[in-house]
Every structure is written in structure tokens, then in C-alpha cells.
Amino acid sequence: MTYCVGLKLDRGLVFMSDTRTNAGVDNISVFKKMFQWEVEGERSITLMTAGNLATTQAVVSLLNERSLPAEERGRLSIIEAPSMFQIAKLVGETLREVIAEQSGIEGPQADSSFGATLILGGQVRGGEPRLFMIYPEGNFVEACDDTPFFQIGETKYGKPILVRAYDPAMTFEAAVKLLMLSFDSTVKANLSVGMPLDVHIYEADTYRHGYIRRIAADDAFYTRISSGWGDKLREAVNSLPDYSFE
Amino acid sequence: MTYCVGLKLDRGLVFMSDTRTNAGVDNISVFKKMFQWEVEGERSITLMTAGNLATTQAVVSLLNERSLPAEERGRLSIIEAPSMFQIAKLVGETLREVIAEQSGIEGPQADSSFGATLILGGQVRGGEPRLFMIYPEGNFVEACDDTPFFQIGETKYGKPILVRAYDPAMTFEAAVKLLMLSFDSTVKANLSVGMPLDVHIYEADTYRHGYIRRIAADDAFYTRISSGWGDKLREAVNSLPDYSFE
């Protein structure tokens, strides 16, 4: 499995992904699941992937190849499409195309073992920062005020803390901390999600990549947050009244 | 889906289950998933069920029918078997029998849509309190110091808080609070788990049922814990240092 989260904040977008892939518990590897495209001063695009690794790698390769300026092609590439919506459409079509090719079946393939789900976010000059979740069928939904974040992969362990503590006005520093807590809960509970983590922070209206970092398992801040959280959580539980048997 | 947890503490056993069953999101009902058998002064047995409702109801009915003193039968019933291990074996065999009958296929049926998973716990005089998880195949595992609790159904949302805050020495009052937090996280994140909750607290070496209660959605303590937890969790997140972009 995988765990990736895209958060939409007032200040911009925050992306975090793990790097573990597995084919059974005895075949574990580290693969990057976060990819970026940039036209400085004009657009910054981030893609995170969950699902069949062959499918997601083929999607990213096709998106890259089709972004080559020299290439002859009949349609606009990810670095040329005029809006985030058009980019989401293009990525969705590419995903559906790869799944159809790898499974040998035409048409939407939600249940296919070649399936994959993507989070796409970014900003193109002339538009707002936008965040999408793209399904194996190639269609997609966009984050809004009511649902300001998307998770893909092993989403359940880390959801309660996001639901409770997310605030659109939070700082990037607080958002990274919150995501680390959500990832830490997941990593502690499920072997198929693992360190290191990739993070990208896109600040609204900058039209260039922001802070991009790989966070290792022995990262000083991460280990401090992870061990501190156990204590804080126990304190929080203890500070609530116990049940009473009347 | 369903959410049930059985906790093994130094003082005894704590069981909690939700009551929602669904066949699609538009067909939701309330069904009890926690069942007890007692021979006062001699044994107290609790069973919680997740999976196909027809299967789990048939298992409970068979266990009940076979406990009737008047019935002629070739084997010991759940209220006669000499140990918790023998009871777990009997329940597992009954489960496998029902799945085989309902699916029309002999042999272990892990993947069957008629499947179910059970948590069984209790104490029979002469033995310790014991807690088991019983699989659709009819086999089972027992809780130990390293894995002192079992969850069935929609287990992921509520696991991180259990992993972090469980302590075998905790009081029953603290354990019920902890379970309520685990259930609240799950109910808030997943429509297929719903109120009310059933709770049973078995105190070690009493050999009779303990505190049994149904907790409604408007229960004063539950609503206080649920709303208080959001605040405490945000406080806990805020009390940790924010990430810094060096």
C-alpha cells in the first residue's frame, strides 16, 4: 500500500507521501510517489500516486515524455495546458490509457488490479491553487471548503487526527506537524506504509515549487514529534473524565 | 460494516460493539452484535460478531439451541465445555459449519461473502480470563501480553488511539473511556459504524456477567467525551512544536 495526503490551506497546498511499495510483506522497496513539474513563474504541479506501481510509473513517464518541447504531438502537455482543470483531465486520460493498455481491456477499469488513484495539485497563473483526486476511471473530484484534503492508499488510520485538527488558516509549519502525526499513526499501525516521507509545500501565487524535502526515519524533528505524541495523547486521554458506573 | 473491540486488562475483560448493519448505505439497521452466556458462579462468556449478519445470527442461534439442557446431543455445549479453549473450538466449528451450509461449499471459506469474524472472551472456573479472535475458517488466535486486544470490522480508524493509550493496569472506568474514544473516531469517519454501543465489563474471578449497558448517541457521558476529545486533541497537537523550515 501507500499513504499520501494533499492538504488545501488558505496559504497554499501541502503534499506528503510515503515511499514504501510492497508485493507481499516479504518484498518491500522504496519508491518515490511524489512528482513535480514546474514552469518557473508560471506553474507548479505536484502529483502523488497510489496503486499498481507499474501503472503509476508509466503514467508519470508518459506525462514526462509528452512534456518534451521537441516532441510532436496532437495535444497540450502538462506544462502547457491552460488550467489545473485541463491538467487534471490530461492526467486522468493518461491514467485510464495506461490501465487499459496494461490490463488489455478498454473502458473504465475501477476494479482492475492494474488500478491506481492519484492526488494532483498546483497552480497555473491566472487561476487559484487547486487540488484534485483522480480515479482509475480517469474522472476526478476537486477539494472544496467542505472537503479540504484528500488521502489515497492506506487512509483510515490517519484520518481521525486530520478530521479533528485540520484548520484552513493553519501555518505551513503546523500543517507539516499535523501531517507527520497522521503519517506516524499510519506507519505505527500498518507495515505497508513506511519511511522516509516526501514533502512539498506550495505557497499560493508563487508559481514555483516551494519547500521540497525528504524526511528520513531518523529525522530529529520527526522522532521528537512521534515520541512526544504518545505522551500528549495519553495526557489528553487522562485529562478527560473516566466513565462512571452509576 | 461493524466495529467491535475486546480488551484484556489485568482486572478482567472489556467488550464494546456498535449496532449498525448495512446492505448498502441506503439500507441501515440496528442489530445487537454482542451476546452473553452465563452459569452464575461458574462461567461468563461474551461473543461479538462482524460479517454476514445471516451467518452470525445462525451461529448464535445454534449456540443457544445447543445449550438447551433438554436437548439430546453428542457433544458439550458452550455452557458445559470445560475451558475457554474448548468453547472457542466449539464456536469456531459452529461458525465454519454455518458458512459451509450457507455458501453450499464444504471446507474453509475465508473469502466467502457468507464469512464472519468473531471475538470471544470470558472465564470458566479453573482457568484465567481469556480472549480469542475466531476466523471464518473456524480457527482462532488468543490475546497475549504483546497483543492484548482484538478488533473486528472497521478496525483502522480506532486503532492508533488504542495502540498509544492502552495499558493493562488501567481501571475499567479508564478503559471504557478509551474504547469510547476509539469508537468515536470510527463513527465520525465511517458511516457503516453507528450508535448505540453495547458494553460489557467482566471482572476477573467473578464468574458472572459484570456491567452490561447500552450507550445511546445522546448519552451524556459519551457526548461529553466526544466533544471534549476534539478540543484535547487540538490542544495536544498545538502543544507539540511546529515544523521549522531551516
Image (cartoon, coloured by chain):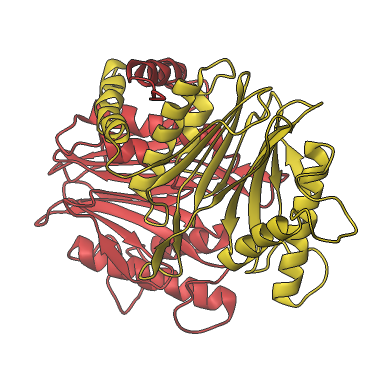
Chain colours: A red, B yellow
Position in image of residue B217 (x %, y %): 31, 45
Residue visible at 54% across and 77% down in the picture: A101
Asked whether residue A71 is in view, the answer is no
Q: Is residue A178 left or right of residue A220?
A: left
Instruction: Out of A38 and B25, give the one closest to the viewer.
Output: B25
Q: Is residue A193 left or right of residue B74?
A: left
Position in image of residue B246 (x %, y %): 30, 18
Position in image of residue A78 (x %, y %): 30, 62
Quadrant housing residue B222: top left
Q: Please count the marks in the image.
A: 0
Residue visible at 26% across and 28% down in the picture: B228
Residue visible at 69% across and 56% down in the picture: B64
Q: Residue furthest left?
A: A126
Q: Residue furthest bottom?
A: A106
- Looking at the image, residue A126 lies above or below residue A75: above
Q: Is residue B228 left or right of residue B146?
A: left
- Looking at the image, residue B216 lies above or below residue A131: above
Asked whether residue B69 is in view, the answer is yes
Instruction: Out of B212 and B183, give the one closest to the viewer.
Output: B212
Quadrant housing residue A135: bottom left
- Looking at the image, residue A225 lies above or below residue B221: above
Q: Residue furthest front?
A: B70
Residue visible at 38% across and 25% down in the picture: A246
Position in image of residue A64 (x %, y %): 40, 60
Instruction: Out of A29 and A146, give the one closest to the viewer.
Output: A146
